[in-house]
Structure formats: C-alpha cells, structure tokens
C-alpha cells in the first residue's frame, strides 16, 4: 500500500489516494477467481472448472478486479489511515479510480475525520463546589422504607379504610350488561393506590368483610378501552376480607432482622455513612460537570453532523436495550407515548451534541498535555472490570477494545488535571439555599 495523497477538504473531510501494488493486487485477483469461478456458466465446462482466461474473455478482463479490491480494502484502508495520521468518525466513501494487473489498483477514499478543535482556557478555572451533608430526615426515610418492606399483612375486623387492602369479588355492568375484563375474584385492592378507575376505591372504603354492595363509577373519557370511555358503570362488589399492614417496631431487634447490625443506632450510622459517600460522589461529579461546561463554552469547533447522528444512534440503541430488559419493544413504546421515531431521535439530539463536544474537548486536552494511560493503570482497569462482571481477567482482555479503554483512561486523567489545577471554593449546600432564598 502506498498513500499517494492526503488532502484536507471542507467540513472535516479528508481525501486519500491509495495505491495497491501490482503483486498484491494480482494475488487478490487470483483469490477472487478461485472464490467466484463457480458463479459463471461457460459452454463446454462444468461450473467452477472453466479456465480464468476464458471467463475474462466472456465477461471482461476486469471481471474479478472489483472483488479483489473489496477483499483488500479493509486492510489497505486501515494502513492508509495510520499513515495519514487521521481519526475517521464515519464510514469511508471509496471510488475505484483504476485497476490493471500491470500497475495494480488506485483508490480514492473520502472520509469524515475528527474536527479541528481550538481550546480556550482549561487550567486554573474557578468553580464553586456545593457540599451536601446527609440530613437525619434522609436516614429516617430509609429506615421507614425498610420498615415498610418488612411489614406484615394481617386480617382485621371493622370497616375498610384508606391504606387497607380489600379482598373483593367484582363484576362490572354498563347499561345492565356485563362487559369483558370487568370481572375478578379474590382480588387484593390497595385502597388509595389509584389502581382502579377514579371513585372505585373510595366507595369500597366504609364497608366491612361479608358485605355485598354496588358502586357507581364513570369511566374516564380517555379510557384505553374505547368502548367504555365516558360510560357510566355499576360494579357489584363482595368484600371478603379487610387487611392492614402491621409495621415492625423500630428497635434493636428490627435492626438484627433486616441487617448485619446488632443495634438500630449502628444500622442508622451505616445508612448515614453510605448515603454520605454517595452524596460526596454526586457533589464531585457536579463539580466536574461545572468545570467541563466552562471548557466547552470556551472551545471553538465545527462538529460534523455524522458525529452527532452516530451518538444519537448509540443513545437510541441503549434506550432500546433497556426497554428490552423490561420486556418492551421500542415500536410499542412509541405507540404508548404517541411519538414517532423522528421525534424520539430528536429528543436526544441536544444531549448528544453536548456529549460529542465534551469528548472532543477532553480528547484535545489529552493531545495537548500528552496524557497517556500507563500499563499499570490499564491492568488496574482490567481487574476492576473482572471484579465487576465476575469474569477472569484473561477473558476481559480478550473482549475489551484495548486502545479504546486506554483512551477512556486518558480522558479520566484529563478530568483529574482540570480539577487539580482549578480554583475550587467549597460551599455548604444549606448556605447556598439560604442565599438564594434571601436574593
């Protein structure tokens, strides 16, 4: 391979001319003939048995040239990219200029590359870090959630109240006719949950186990079953049981039951510690975002549209994967949200553009500061991934893209450089709120 031309065009496009020598091209043509000879019908020969010169006489002397170039292209393109010192961000457009067994092949390739980035200041930035302290109410709320999760459901006497669970049989009628999907037996209905249509649960409240009664409701105008939308309905109810949730007492025994701690105070202390660690991470991330936002505002770059589109593609795929984990297809989600793929993609565009800018800015800092990830740092990342996914380190090394991981590690070091050189003022979040209130 010989890189004969490396020319910058407008809009972060680069044109390459790549020459493939005659010997390499000739070998590729021979391989293309062996692979494709069986596709040609030559009178007097069984498929795949006709000599190459006869096929070329009938179908053209260059009949195998295109396949030969196709087979060579991935390798020669990769070599040309390295020789040109460019970083493509989209698929290349290739044009076959000429081919001959005497001179080899000449290709013209046009590709979009990483745009030029002009950086503003990225060292010595000023930022305020708002520091949050975990409130006792947050700890109490977590304890309350644990208490709710460990509550017992017991049957009780008396009339049903909001917050109770009513075990009911029900059947619905519109104009005296039972409708499909309107019947249930021994159904546990949490009163006040809004699980049924408006007014249904309120009319169960006040009744006791053993009672049979009717309730009157009106289906919402936008009800999903259009044949019932806006209709008045009567439900016949039989109330079997009234149940309530009995919360455990918050004491040391509770702590022993729900955790590895012997006392409630120790459990609270652990919750407080973990919440503070999480809060500290969020505060640090907010500081990073504030500093990076300043850098992005000060940079100058014209981003190729394909970079934003590619990022939108990635975000859509990620969203679709998360939907699939919940057993839902993207097409169905779009129907539920009354949206289109075009609108859905557009909802990601602003975020995608910002993420591309951030990546370009940090990559430029890596370049300017000559930041690299050491082998020790790479090994530590491999170990972290192995521990996270409970895989052997050797397997992790097989499946991860080494160079991309090293780039990510270098990006993280760039963020560390930005933070370490910044002038950061810490401010208690409570004080910040007070000042905003006074303003």
Image (tube, rainbow, N blue to C red):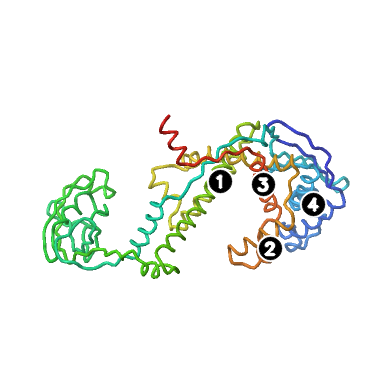
Which SS class for mark 4? helix
Residue 237 in the figure: left or right of residue 90: left
Q: Which residue is mark 2?
A: 398
Say few, some or many: other residues with alpha carbon within 10 Å of mark 4 (under 14 / 14 to 19 / 20 or more).
some
What residue do we see at 38% from left, 51% from top? 137
Instruction: Give the vertical position of 147 relative to 129 (above or below).
Output: below
Q: Position of residue 135 (x, y in %)?
A: 42, 50
Q: Position of residue 406 (x, y in %)?
A: 70, 52
Q: Which residue is mark 3?
A: 411
Which SS class for mark 3? helix
Instruction: Give the vertical position of 43 relative to 130 (above or below).
Output: below
What residue do we see at 41% from left, 33% from top? 437
Using the numbered discs, state the Cα–Cα distance from disc 2 to disc 3 in whole angstroms: 22 Å
Q: Which residue is mark 4?
A: 56
Of circles 1 and 3, which is in front? 1
Q: Earlier in the sequence, mark 2 or mark 3?
A: 2
């Amino acid at each position: 391979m010989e890189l004969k031309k490396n020319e910058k065009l407008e809009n972060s496009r680069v044109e390459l001319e790549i020459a493939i020598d005659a010997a390499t091209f000739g070998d590729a043509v021979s391989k293309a003939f062996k692979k494709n000879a069986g596709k040609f019908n030559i009178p007097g020969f069984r498929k795949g048995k006709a000599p190459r010169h006869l096929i070329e006489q009938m179908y053209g002397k260059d009949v195998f040239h295109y396949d030969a170039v196709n087979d060579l292209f991935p390798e020669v393109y990769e070599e040309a990219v390295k020789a040109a010192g460019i970083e493509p961000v989209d698929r290349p457009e290739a044009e076959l200029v000429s081919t001959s067994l005497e001179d080899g092949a000449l290709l013209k390739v046009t590709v979009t590359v990483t745009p030029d980035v002009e950086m503003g200041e990225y060292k010595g930035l000023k930022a305020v870090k708002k520091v949050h302290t975990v409130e006792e109410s947050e700890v109490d709320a977590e304890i309350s959630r644990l208490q709710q999760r460990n509550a017992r459901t017991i049957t009780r006497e008396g009339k049903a109240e909001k917050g109770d669970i009513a075990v009911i049989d029900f059947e619905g009628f519109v104009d005296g006719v039972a409708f499909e999907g309107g019947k249930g037996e021994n159904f546990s209905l949490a009163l006040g949950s809004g699980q049924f249509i408006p007014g249904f649960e309120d009319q169960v409240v006040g009744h006791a186990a053993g009672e049979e009664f009717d309730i009157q409701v009106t289906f919402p105008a936008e009800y999903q079953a259009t044949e019932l939308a806006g209709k008045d309905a009567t439900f016949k109810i039989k109330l079997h049981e009234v149940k309530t949730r009995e919360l455990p007492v918050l004491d040391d025994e509770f702590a022993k039951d729900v955790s590895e701690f012997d006392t409630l105070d120790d459990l609270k202390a652990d919750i407080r510690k973990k919440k503070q660690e999480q809060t500290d991470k969020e505060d640090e991330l907010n500081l990073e975002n504030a500093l990076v936002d300043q850098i992005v505002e000060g940079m100058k770059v014209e981003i190729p549209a394909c970079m934003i589109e590619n990022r939108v593609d990635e975000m859509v795929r990620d969203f679709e994967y998360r939907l699939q984990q919940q057993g839902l297809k993207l097409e169905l989600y779009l129907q539920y949200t009354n949206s289109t793929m075009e609108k859905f993609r557009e909802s990601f565009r602003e975020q995608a553009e910002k993420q591309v800018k951030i990546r370009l800015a940090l990559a430029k800092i890596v370049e300017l500061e000559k930041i690299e990830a050491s082998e020790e740092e790479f090994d530590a990342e491999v170990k972290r991934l192995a521990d996270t996914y409970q895989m052997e380190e050797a397997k992790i090394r097989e499946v991860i893209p080494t160079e991309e991981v090293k780039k990510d590690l270098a990006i993280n070091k760039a963020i560390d450089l930005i933070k370490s050189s910044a002038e950061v003022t810490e401010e208690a979040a409570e004080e910040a709120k007070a000042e905003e209130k006074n303003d």
